Amino acid sequence: MAMEMRQQLKMSQQLVMTPQLQQAIKLLQLTRLELQDVVRQELEENPLLEETLEADEIRETEQSELSESESAPDVAGEEFKEVETGDDSLRDWDSYLDGYTYSSGEQYREDEDRPSFENLLTRRGTLTDHLLWQLHMGPFTNEEVRIGEEIIGNIDEDGYLRASLEEIAAVCSIDENSVTPVLMRIQEFDPCGIAARSVQECLLIQARFLGMQGSVVEMILQHNLKDLETRKYKQIARDLGVDINQILMAAKIIGGFDPKPGSMYSSEDVHYISADIFVYKVGDEYLVMLNDEGLPNLKVSPYYAEAKSNGLVDARADDYINEKVRSALWLIKSIQQRQRTIYKVAKSIIRFQREFLDQGIEFLRPLVLRDVADDIGMHESTISRVTTNKYMQTPQGLFELKYFFNSGLSTSEGDFVASESVKNRIREIIEKEDTRKPLSDQKIADMLSVQTVNIARRTVTKYREILKLGSSSERKRHF
């Protein structure tokens, strides 16, 4: 067979991701705060993009200006006539004059609905500050203060000393034996159990602070801490030669100790979740409101349109203006499309989960992305992007949009129940159980079967682990 070269024509379809399409997809999956950053950056980089007043006010201003002067440039026609003739994306400039219609979220927010921001107003005291204050107030010499500051500087947020005595001595250029007395005195500071080098030492410090030297509590912490973790009370009683009731009482006391004494001084700020969508019940209907707080109304600056119409720009400036006009319009349209898509998805979710909004989690329906995609005529990938990191405030509480999408389990009646509803039932069953005789996963599965939910034991185990609930042996309490 001879090898030869030939030319051949072939028609094929290919999806091309234009920069504009990439921008629209990117904006769709951004959170509201991330979108604010994108808009702020674009306002800084694009001189033709500017922030407007409220949409209604700006439309009234534009209409009055156009009616007063017939010689004013026609924004919909002549303003960027040259650009429109070469770019189909700008031909729907008239629709832009309808305004950014999704910027009315603030008017539905009352002051009492806003989260409290007290944690942002004052600086919270840290564990290091609290320990240094005690160090400087105590009867320490200058040398001991220098050693104590090095020790405190190596205490982590849980209250544990993460540096060895040898390392501290090397930094302070002293003998290791000089560090130990200072460490012992710092371990007497508040909170109790601070500056320990292990969990065992932390608990022993707290036991000794309560005057339990030589008690069963101290003996358990010194010799049988591992057995205590696995609740081998009989084994501990045999090893220590004491009655099982004494072991149970000591275990109860140890259970009241704090294994992370520094956590109460955690410097982490409280992070509030701001809902992207608000759902209000008005009569028998649910009203959807988008939260556009912080998102400015955008428009293309008319200054450059006047400069173009008056012939005050050269060819290079004209090309630059046209490019920035396209960029501004695409950003405005992408934001509008994003808001419309989120609104459609929210309305569709409400239609599917109407019973949940009315009566609670027990009536949550099984739902997948394809159901919503088919309902509003969009692709599943679009629904997935919209529901990522978006939150909806409903009469039942605040939920991530992905919360409403979950698989279903069959019932003996031929219906389906949402997996989240089943998880809630498992949590309720475990909360009501007798902790002295906790229920096994098989027993929970049997109880759910009585409630018409067909579920296997391994599924109960999986859901229980997702809920971070221990097994029956881990939940068992002897006191």
Image (spheres, rainbow, N blue to C red):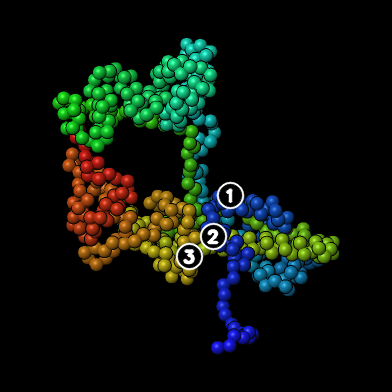
Amino acid marked by disc 2: Leu
Q: CA distance from mark 2 to mark 1?
A: 17 Å
Location of residue 466 in the rendering, given as x and y in whole percent from the top left corner: 33, 50
Q: Earlier in the sequence, mark 3 or mark 2?
A: 2
Say above or below: 275 vs 263.
below
What residue lies at 67% left-to-right and 60% top-to-bottom? 328
Estimate how packed mark 1 is, as few (under 14), some (14 to 19) or many (20 or more) residues with alpha carbons within 10 Å: few
Mark sitting on residue 381 = 3
Q: CA distance from mark 3 to mark 1?
A: 27 Å
In which quadrant will I find the N terminus? bottom right
Residue 179 visible, this orientation: no
Q: Nearer the viewer, mark 2 or mark 1?
A: 2
> Which residue in the protein does label 1 denote?
294
Location of residue 175 in the rendering, given as x and y in whole percent from the top left corner: 48, 16
Residue at the extreme front:
1
> Which residue in the protein does label 2 denote?
28
340 or 104: nearer the eye? 340
What residue lies at 37% left-to-right and 24% top-to-bottom? 193
Q: Earlier in the sequence, mark 3 or mark 1?
A: 1
Estimate how packed mark 2 is, as few (under 14), some (14 to 19) or many (20 or more) residues with alpha carbons within 10 Å: many
Left or right: residue 408 versus residue 311 is left
Asked if the residues shown at circle 3 and circle 1 are in contact, with their CB atoms under 8 angstroms apart, the answer is: no
Snapshot quadrant of residue 19: bottom right
Location of residue 144 in the rendering, given as x and y in whole percent from the top left corner: 49, 15
